[in-house]
Amino acid sequence: MPDLGTLSVSRLGFGAMGLSNTYGQADDAASIATIHRAIDLGVTLFDTATGYGEGHNERLLGEAIRARRDELVIASKFVHRPNGGGAEVAPVQPRAAVDASLKRLGVERIDLYYLHRVDPLIAIEESIGELGRLVEAGKIGAVGVSEATADGIRRAHATYPLTALQSEYSLWTRDVEVEILPTVRELGIGFVAYSPLGRGFLAGAEVTDPNDRRLIHPRFLPEAVAANSQRRATIEQVAKRVGASVAQVSLAWVLSKNVVPIPGTRHIEHLEANWAANDLVLDAESLVALEAAFPRGATTGARYPSEALKLVPPEPVAA
Ligand SMILES: NC(=O)c1ccc[n+]([C@@H]2O[C@H](COP(=O)([O-])OP(=O)(O)OC[C@H]3O[C@@H](n4cnc5c(N)ncnc54)[C@H](OP(=O)(O)O)[C@@H]3O)[C@@H](O)[C@H]2O)c1
């Protein structure tokens, strides 16, 4: 089992965001069955956030894990100001956010609680310092941060030891390799890779629901899909050669970086296929081919719409 700072977790975690209608319609009963199957398979890290489905996601996860909570590592997140709100919005304080998350999840303690986005108007030391006090109060087990810059990570870690950094990492989003991964490795902070399947693109999934949030993401505009599909063809070739699926090859690549991916799915068959990526070790030839097809910065389309992009670290300059 890999270590995530002070926590021991399964090699692959489970991201619950898509169970709240983010990427097409989800069904609560099917979602709960999927979470139960994940637990049976051996997944121990489950990831949610206050913002997913405006509380629905934490409530759903809480209900699904109730009987086996003690075997699991439950992670959630908060932001001071939802939807990128500015000075006109009164910031949510960590203590109030944690209390609300605890209630929705129905647990006595959340094992890992992240600052979901660094607030441009609140010093990271202030946010993380307060989360550290909530560890001391027994409300959360450990502190994380999502999408911080290398400097932000250092400042946060100096304030209270971080257990995990959660950032986007997959074949088509390799920005963290420049500064952020080396920083967390140096500091002994765990790395959780979110959207490891490129929000489904690197699994070969297609967006068909008109309410799917991906449709406002630049990478899912038709011209971007057309350009990025040419790169994805290499994953298909590797998958064919090694006798695995496209999703499994994409996940095996992330696993090869010794980080903890948290793929999401609404479907048991996808979950089972993704879990099997645990056993797929890509050979050097495959790794070279994949990395040549997806050099850092080559993906067509930004990874977030413009407003959301302001709250994540800037793309590193080309080498
Ligand atoms: N910290 C942050 O800011 C942040 C941001 C985004 C996400 N996250 C976390 O990371 C988790 C995972 O990221 P994500 O959900 O954005 O993206 P992802 O895990 O990269 O991809 C999820 C998508 O892939 C599809 N999929 C999964 N397995 C598949 C398979 N074997 N074959 C075909 N399609 C497959 C899913 O569709 P089906 O449901 O149809 O399987 C879903 O649409 C989230 O749930 C959330 O917990 C964190």
Image: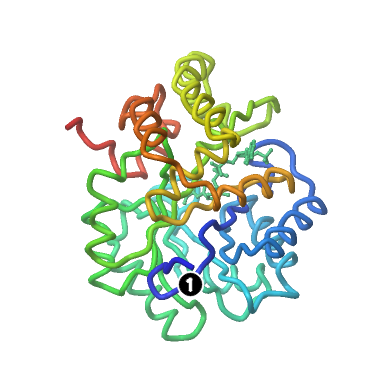
Measuring from the top left, give residue 97's x and y in whole percent.
52, 67
Measuring from the top left, give residue 311's x and y in whole percent.
37, 44
Name the residue nearer the viewer: 286 or 89.
Answer: 286
Q: Quadrant of residue 103?
A: bottom right
Specify the farthest residue to the left.
Answer: 319
Name the residue nearer the viewer: 291 or 208.
Answer: 291
At x 48%, y 78%, the residue is 141
Q: How is the image coloured?
A: rainbow
Specify the farthest residue to the bottom.
Answer: 137
Q: Is mark 1 within 8 Å of ligand 1?
A: no
Name the residue nearer the viewer: 134 or 181.
Answer: 181
Name the residue nearer the viewer: 212 or 175.
Answer: 175
Measuring from the top left, give residue 22's x and y in whole percent.
63, 41
Asked if residue 154 lies left or right of residue 172, the reply is: left
At x 66%, y 56%, the residue is 57
Circle 1 — which element?
A: strand
Q: Quadrant of residue 104?
A: bottom right
Asked if residue 294 lies left or right of residue 141, the reply is: left
Does 120 appear above or below 201?
below
Measuring from the top left, give residue 264's x and y in whole percent.
61, 47
Asked if residue 24 lies left or right of residue 204, the reply is: right
Say few, some or many: other residues with alpha carbon within 10 Å of mark 1 (under 14 / 14 to 19 / 20 or more). Answer: some
The residue indicated by pointer 1 is 8
At x 31%, y 73%, the residue is 161
Give ligand 1's quarter of the image.
top right
Amino acid, disc 1? Ser
Which quadrant is the C terminus positioned in?
Answer: top left
